[in-house]
Image (spheres, rainbow, N blue to C red):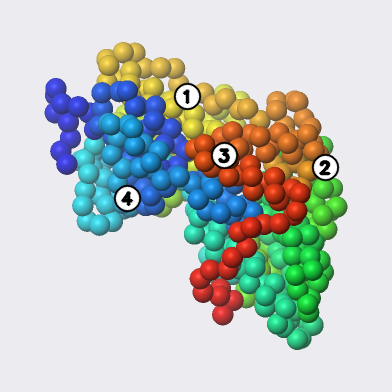
Amino acid sequence: MERAMPGNTPHVVVVGGGFAGLWATRALASADVRITLLDRGNHHLFQPLLYQVATAGLSAPDIAAPLRHILRRQGNATVLMAEAAAIDKDARRVQLASGDAIDYDALIVCTGATHAYFGNDAWAPFAPGLKTLDDALAIRRRILTAFERAEAERDPAARAAWLTFCVVGGGPTGVELAGTLAEIARHTLRKEFRNIDPGDSRVLLLEAGPRVLSTFPDALAAKARASLARLGVDVRTGTPVSRIDADGVSLGEEHIAARTVLWAAGVAASPLARTLDVPLDRAGRVAVQPDLTLPGHPEVFVAGDLATLQRADGRPVPGVAPAAKQMGAYIAQVLRARFAGRSAPAPFRYRDYGNLATIGRRAAVVDLHGFRFSGFPAWTFWLLAHVFFLIGFRNRVVVMLDWAMAYWTYQRNARIVLGKDPTK
């Protein structure tokens, strides 16, 4: 595919169909450009609810939608299910894993992040992380299989290990996973087994820092920890994990026998960033200009979890969905001005609307720029916010119905074990 020549329609290639890529593509809907959106999968994923799929609260299609369906009415956009392997900035070309190549006039790279084990990659098979639907389904299989193996286990020590669940990382994802695991054990699976009592399960949340939810104010973090304690979660802070293997987790000299360990502690930028031949930070992210371009290459934009940019107060733009959406929309604004010959817009400015996290049934914490609340009001706000931001009317209705049913019955209707037993 050739680049646009003078008088031809500019070709914009978007690598990644997440929040940044999709918002940029949609914001260019009426622009006189050709857009090619590349993604390894065929769907856009609402990542904030991914843990609900991992814990059997929602089904995969409830939080995802096919990219082709989302963009079906956008005539200037073409969706290509393909993996970008490398980027040649000088040739303005994206090399695909298939061996094909796509040329561009403008490039938007937003391939997100993956798991980071802080140099301990050998832990990965024993402590899966949560970034994709495949990850969520594998974790769901691991959790549900643990109860099944405990039911069949005769040795008390081995049974206890199957009924011990460790979540490493006390950020929002770790807190949400730990709280939900406790609810599953104590409520959802109640009276369903004969040889075990799922309520005897141990759920541990392990955080190396001094407290959970480090990006929240101290008071809200303390309330979150108290809510976890009421659910029966054993929160350990201030001691980093020193080892993870098939038998469990080590915290210094203490070893915790656990057959299910979940990783929510660290992320690293997509490996595609390394092919841009630019300096990267410790997490593999690209330091971008104030207009989200690469130094010396104004035609290349980087957004979402792949980019790092300092705000006016010196803090980095966080790797959250609202930031990625704002970046995508801003890049579209820059491209519209550039192709129309207008002045460039002001540098990107992240608008922080606040933080929120749920701990479990009727428990959440919300920080909206000084307006802070917790408990049932925060939980209601969290529910409504997530339903509102889901893509597609069908997904909103299904999620609301599933949550309503779960609220009244504690049931999780996606408790189907599929695929190979991960414990064998």
Q: Of helix, strand and loop, which one carries label 4?
A: strand
Which mark sits nearer the N-terminus, 1 or 4? 4
Residue identified by numbered label 3? 396
Which mark sits nearer the N-terminus, 1 or 3? 1
User: Does residue 415 appear to the left or right of 358 in the view shown?
Assistant: left
Name the residue at 17% across, 41% down.
1
Q: Residues within 10 Å of mark 4 (few under 14, many from 20)?
A: some
Instruction: Compute the Cα span from label 1 to label 3.
Output: 31 Å
Q: Is 30 situated above or below 247?
A: above
Q: Is 373 situated above or below 129?
A: above
Where does residue 195 sit, x and y in percent of width and height? 78, 79
Residue identified by numbered label 4? 81
Where does residue 193 sit, x and y in percent of width and height? 75, 73
Q: Of helix, strand and loop, which one carries label 3?
A: helix
Which mark sits nearer the N-terminus, 4 or 3? 4
Return the residue nearer the eye: 240 or 220: 220
Residue identified by numbered label 1? 348
Q: Of helix, strand and loop, which one carries label 2?
A: helix
- The residue under label 2 is which amino acid type? Lys
User: Which one is in front in this view, the residue at disc 4 or the one at disc 2?
Assistant: 4
- The residue under label 3 is which amino acid type? Arg
- The residue under label 4 is which amino acid type? Met
Name the residue at 68% across, 59% down.
167
Q: Is 235 situated above or below 377?
A: below
Instruction: Compute the Cα span from label 4 to label 2.
Output: 44 Å
Q: Quadrant of the C terminus?
A: bottom right
**Numbered tag placed on residue 60 in the rendering:** none
Circles 3 and 2 in contact, beta carbons < 8 Å: no
Q: Of helix, strand and loop, which one carries label 1?
A: loop
Residue identified by numbered label 2? 223
Instruction: Compute the Cα span from label 3 to label 2.
Output: 29 Å
